[in-house]
Amino acid sequence: MSPDAPATNTPAPDQAASEPVLELRGVNTHYGAVHILKDVDLAIYSGELVCLLGGNASGKSTTLRTILGMVKPTTGDVVLNGQVVTTRSTRERVALGVTMVPENRRLFKRLTVGENLEMGAFLRNDADGIATDREWVFELFPRVKERLNQKAGTLSGGEQQMVAIGRALMARPQILLMDEPSMGLAPALVQQNFELIQQIHESGLTVFMVEQNANMALSIADRGWVLQTGRVVLDDTAQNLLAHPDLQASYLGTAEQ
Amino acid sequence: MQKTTKQRTNVDWFLTVLRVASLAVIAAGFAAFVAQLIDSDNPFARWANPDAISLTGEQFRGLVVTGLAQGSMYGLIALGYSMVYGVLGFINFAHGEVFMVGAMTGAITSNKLAESGYWESSFVVCLLLVVVLSMLVCTITAVVMERVAYRPLRGKPRLIPLITSIGVSFFLQNCVLALLGSTVKSYPDLPNWLTDKRTFLDVQGSKILVVLVAATAMVALWYLVEKTKTGKAMRAVAEDAEIASLMGIDVNRIIVKTFAVGGAMAGVAGILWGLLFRSVIHTTGFLPGIKAFSSAVVGGIGNLGGSMAGGLTIGVAESLGPLMILEPLGVSGPSQLRDAVAFAVLIIVLLVRPSGLFGEQLPSDERT
């Protein structure tokens, strides 16, 4: 894959004409001398729910960190809404409409739920818009409203997940990144969590999730990629990926032992 | 500390003995004090210290107010240690020197005001002006210190900024020495209505003033940290800087603001020092700085309410401790031992509650 040919993915037909919300073009990322991401090309279109699959140390988290500017790629570009943001700071990228629900939620546990939501909207100054989005979050998660003045650290795992998603939504993102949404949750909650993600996606948001739990992720995603030692090895629709014989061999076989 | 799965080691036993011994000394001293109050001829009081004279109610009240006044000053300085520790995870030992710079600024400006006569004619306005100026100078000192000395060391092991802070401390001391000389700078006399003892509750008005100013500064800080967007961002950065930056919070800017606020509080404390002790030299910052650091640890470092409470604890303890615990036990010249009492409080609190009275609040990457 050369950096000049970003469109190696197969976007859904009706979106083929539009510009991607988020694009990685031939990205190579190193940690010191270690080559983590190798020529990664991804394109995510408005309204999609896509997932990036891969086992431990396959480069999934690095992909997200590269998108957000927490690490800079050695070569290649990150493009947000048509703007090349490769050299921009995390802050500027957040302002351009990308936000992440981090792995293990990582709420500000000593802040109240309400303050956590407020931090999510840190870069916004439109008080009315923030109030509207707060109501939207309460509508999605009535539980969050009940717990508004409680310290986030006192919430249960499932409730914390809701607050983490709510906090990200408060930035009114163009695209929501989710790092391992099923990590650290009880099995019953994992199912519930994926229903939440689907619900948010159906409300019109573009979602890009990174997940180890391939079957669960593919059951709600439109498309997916499989990452193996930093290289995209599979790129297909969710149904095709689920049926793909290599999926088991390349990834599930090692990750779910 | 006590692991149920492991057998108690010798160290555990040693610590237990230390805990019991230190608490027993306090209990015995206090019991002897009470025995004296009841009747200085009773056998226990005579056994403990035959020459001891018990405190009168007025003396006791005076000591408590003195302790509270000094304690609130320690508390204000402690906030700076605590906030910087909360956000960056190292102890900024130069913070005591920022406090000294504030006290110096106060001495210079208040003398100028006294020369012009305003200090006596409109004391409250002058005091306000002096406090604001001192806050300003200390804020600038703290911010420049962060920019020049600590920011280049961001991301380095914590020991490096820690040692740098000791260097910065000497640097500031010597700057003041070079600029202002080694003579003692005195504050002008306070108005009579402040120094007279009859003002309120039979204690010196200046001490009440110190407590009031400290309380005002504390309320302002509480409002800033708890209610404003900047304050919430400060707490968010203190807890998890990486995630805070993911929210679009400019972590560097928040760190600068943290230093600025800590500096401003040290500036207020510098003026309080001036009101209490009325003289300052370039080494003034050291002992109050170390005591304030102890206060922050006693209250639980990173915890702002704890810092204030820790300051009051140490202030009252060093004021009351010598005469309530040591004197009844027959220690001679107990009032000379107030500094020892202050640090004994630190040691005892660390022995009994290692994370401070109100629990420390560390960044989440350190809580493992």
Image (spheres, coloured by chain):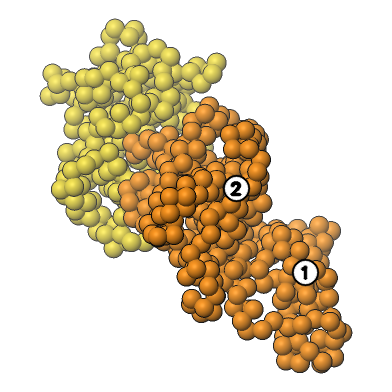
Chain colours: A yellow, B orange
**Is label 2 or label 1 in front?**
2
- Image location of residue B339, percent across then percent down: 71, 59
Label 1 crowd (10 A; few <14 / some 14-19 / many >=20): some
Assess whether mark 1 and mark 2 are in contact (beta carbons under 8 angstroms).
Answer: no
**What subunit carries mark 2?**
B
Is residue A4 visible in the rendered image? The answer is yes
Return the residue nearer the eye: B290 or A123: B290
The amino acid marked with disc number 1 is Pro
Q: Is B257 situated above or below A88?
A: below
- Name the element at disc 2: strand
Per the rendering, the mark at residue B28 is none
Q: Badge 1 sits on which subunit?
A: B
- Badge 2 and badge 1 in a common chain: yes
Could you tell me which secondary element the residue under label 1 belongs to?
helix
- Residue in the foreground of this view, choosing between A123 and B271: B271
Residue with the mark numbered 2: B185
Residue B127, quarter of the rendered image: bottom left
Q: Which residue is located at x 66 percent, y 51 percent?
A: B287
- Relative to B176, B352 lies left or right: right
> Mark 1 — residue?
B334
Position in image of residue B153 (x %, y %): 56, 29
State the separation of the CA atoms marked 2 and 1.
Answer: 29 Å
